[in-house]
Image (cartoon, coloured by chain):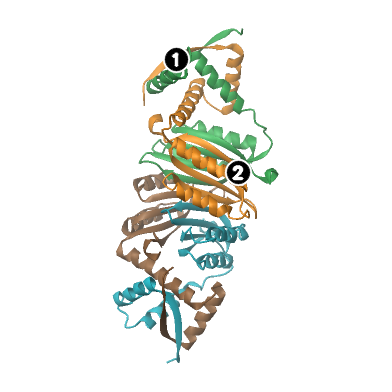
Chain colours: A orange, B green, C cyan, D brown
């Protein structure tokens, strides 16, 4: 466990009230832990900008009856197979699939794979979510 | 201009150092303004429509050696087992795990589960990504 | 002693060579007796109780470059989508995929899906493992 | 595509009849493809014996309320984290989980991990299924 230091901030009264509500609603035991998590979340997004190695999740919903879409999606993933850790596939309905692709690699490569997937016809929605590999948050 | 109040927080030394770097690099004149913006960003993300059925992905990185964390995370998921479709778990290192939880349900329930997971000690990072179930995009 | 009939098969040269090695190493006097035993082993595995609800895992390795195989596999799974809980896909090499399909349903339906997958050209190996749903073990 | 050769076998009339029934019931278009798959399945099990690198699936059903079981299972997997590719977790009921662990490594190490998991109290059922990494079946 690391040493703790005091951090003293000034904040507008209305924003402070909103913060209090957020902390309570989110179930945190105290404000400090809540703000520490905000900082950690922000650190993760900074890595992304710096093109460090990141962990990401691409979530997509698609119509598997769309001609050759399934093959195209697998092709794209194999083409980036050093970045793709695992793909989890759930059959939502007879037509629709949800797929979650867990990826690790340089941020710009991950972003490119996400863009390529996003562009495929028949992909109804896709979303890239960025996460740290955890090393520096430890 | 609103009245300013003092907000005093405790924070681990290494995280404090990272914060200092972030503030400097981002061109903020002071720490307070930086943290106030983090809080504002978080407020924006709580403005979701709370009633729609959504598909979501909760991605987290955690230290599995943290006492009873693994059990706590499974408990939380079972408690929401009607919303949890599947959890995919990858072992990043001897200590760190990445987990992707695919969820489907009312937005406010999904948000609540994500908050509960986020606040567990030992969870280094977690991110909720909301996606449509695809029905209305079809 | 039963009457013997001739069975004539076509087989790829590399697989034939592997068969020859297997026969020799296993100490069989001839190829025919070896293949007859393979068929007998397979018969034993069809002796399941066809009515129980089971949990099963179908593990397969396939060449995703095989024309339309990926689409065919997804079609088969969607056609049985009430039985398929989740599919996990790992990219082994640029060409080869491993897929694990977690299924739950009546044993004979699970067996049928496993057979359909097994017989697709380009599926290099597939294996059905049947497990209890746990209810009666509890 | 490899060259095909003819393989001619002698087989007892009753076994031939059983084979015909199996081929038909399994939905294969011809006998040759059925027998080729029997040979491929057998090759995979030989690798296993030879302690080559294999792909395996450990499927288990467990009661997550069993004290410290979830942590024990994650510990075991992290201890073998070079062999564990991914774990997929499904919540069957409020109490019961199904987990599928996809593993790759030397056969005896995989077998050892499967044995350790099998021995844990609270694991109601577990099953190891062996698969090839696909290289020599290609």
Indicate the position of residue D62 as horizontal and vertical percent values.
Answer: 48, 52
In the displayed structure, B4 sits above or below B111; it is above
The residue lying at 51 percent from left, 18 percent from top is B35
The residue lying at 48 percent from left, 72 percent from top is C45
Q: Which residue is mark 1?
A: A7
Quadrant in the picture for residue B63: top left
Quarter of the image containing the N terminus of chain A?
top left
Residue B89 visible in the current orientation: yes
In the displayed structure, D138 sits above or below A93; it is below
Q: Chain of mark 1?
A: A
Quadrant in the picture for residue A60: top right
Q: How many marks?
A: 2
Q: Which mark is residue A118?
A: none
In the displayed structure, A42 sits above or below C125; it is above
Indicate the position of residue C112 as horizontal and vertical percent values.
Answer: 56, 67
Indicate the position of residue D126 as horizontal and vertical percent values.
Answer: 44, 57
Q: Dot 2: what SS?
A: loop
Camera-side residue of A14 and A96: A96
For the residues labelled 2 and 1, the Cα–Cα distance comes to 39 Å
Instruction: Answer with left or right where residue A5 lies relative to residue B4.
Output: left
Camera-side residue of A31 and B43: B43
Contact, mark 2 vs mark 1 (Cβ under 8 Å): no
Quarter of the image containing the C terminus of chain A?
top left
Local packing at callout 2 (Cα closer than 10 Å; few below 14, some 14-19, many 20+) is: many
Instruction: Answer with left or right where residue C33 lies relative to residue B8.
Output: left
Residue B102 visible in the current orientation: no
Task: Determine if marks 2 and 1 fall on one subunit.
Answer: no
The residue lying at 62 percent from left, 36 percent from top is B109
Q: Which residue is mark 2?
A: B83
Indicate the position of residue D83 as horizontal and vertical percent values.
Answer: 36, 51
The residue lying at 34 percent from left, 68 percent from top is D46
């Amino acid at each position: 466990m690391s040493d703790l230091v005091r951090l003293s901030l000034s904040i507008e009264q209305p924003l402070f009230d909103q913060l209090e509500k957020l902390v309570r609603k989110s179930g945190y035991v105290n404000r400090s832990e809540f703000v520490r998590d905000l900082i950690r979340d922000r650190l993760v997004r900074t890595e992304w900008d710096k093109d460090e190695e990141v962990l990401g999740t691409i979530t997509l919903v698609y119509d598997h009856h769309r001609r050759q879409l399934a093959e195209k999606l697998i092709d794209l993933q194999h083409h980036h197979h050093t970045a793709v850790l695992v793909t989890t596939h759930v059959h939502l309905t007879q037509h629709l699939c949800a797929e979650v692709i867990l990826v690790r690699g340089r941020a710009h490569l991950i972003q490119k794979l996400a863009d390529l997937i996003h562009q495929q016809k028949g992909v109804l929605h896709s979303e890239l979510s960025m996460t740290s590999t955890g090393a520096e948050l430890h």
